[in-house]
Image (cartoon, rainbow, N blue to C red):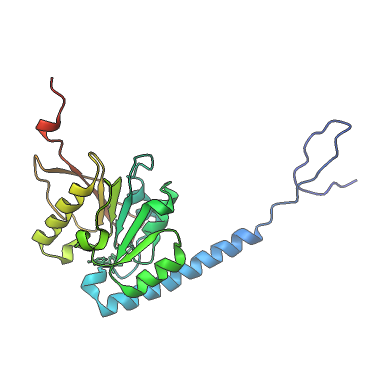
Amino acid sequence: MMLPYGSLKPVEWNQPVTFSPPHSSRPRATAERQSFLSGIMDGGRFLRQWAGNPLGIGAIVPSSPHLAEAMAGFIDPDRDGPVVELGPGTGVVTKAILNQGVAADRLTSIEYCEDFARLLRTRFKDVSIVRGDAYDLAASLGQQPPLAAVVSSLPLFTSPPAKRRALIIDALDRLAPGAPFIQFSYALVAPVKEERGLFTVSTSGWIWNNMPPARVWIYRKSVSPLAKEPA
Ligand SMILES: C[S@@+](CC[C@H](N)C(=O)[O-])C[C@H]1O[C@@H](n2cnc3c(N)ncnc32)[C@H](O)[C@@H]1O
């Protein structure tokens, strides 16, 4: 007799025999098709926003999930404190931050573009989406306990060097000791150079699976010699 296909578990003689239904590939195919379509629609949204404000948007397509995952990989989800995202766009990095294990109610994402902010509110109901200027953290974020991470997709190179530096100093002041300011860029050099005694910069390798290839830069506050344990 032909048995129905699916997994057949060995059973004791007096146990009921159960058959698991074969795995259907239909739900996965539907999810893949939906995610493909939503990727295409996000590409269209991005291009439209870029056409209206190329310097503010800073990219013609959203980051790839590979880049987003590489950025989120620098967050330690077990470190206490809120996580702040700057320039979430259509939310690819937001999603990666949540996948990294950061609870949605710990995350605040600051987005300047009103259309993107509206879209993000429908996509991430438990994330606090602030429509504001990420360069003005005092106004957009207000007072918060020490942050566990800041994850930025801002197009820093389209802003003057002094403004970029001021943002990084302000963000590092709001971060818990050792916590990272995470930034991506397509450039060969760091968006803000390391300043010995003030903050360090390190970088990931190139993430080729992104258009264009990008790197992740990690800024951390230097440990003040005064704050070190006495020898
Ligand atoms: C390069 S896109 C990155 C979007 C998305 N995180 C991604 O990786 O696909 C930069 C984003 O930063 C936003 N942005 C630019 N300047 C901003 C500012 N001053 N405050 C908040 N968001 C800003 C843009 O609207 C855009 O959504």
Q: Position of residue 208 (x, y in %)?
A: 33, 54
Assign the N terminus to one quadrant of the image: top right
Q: Is residue 10 above or below residue 185?
A: above
Q: Is residue 58 above or below residue 9?
A: below
Q: Position of residue 162 (x, y in %)?
A: 8, 59
The residue depicted at 17 percent of the width and 62 percent of the height is 157
In this rendered view, identify the residue nearer to me: 81 or 212: 81
Q: Is residue 91 visible?
A: yes
Assign the C terminus to one quadrant of the image: top left
Quadrant of picture, ligand 1: bottom left
Residue 122 sits in quarter: bottom left
Left or right of 189 on screen, residue 38: right
Q: Position of residue 98 (x, y in %)?
A: 42, 52
The residue depicted at 9 percent of the width and 45 percent of the height is 195
Q: Position of residue 135 (x, y in %)?
A: 19, 62
In this rendered view, identify the residue nearer to me: 226 or 63: 226
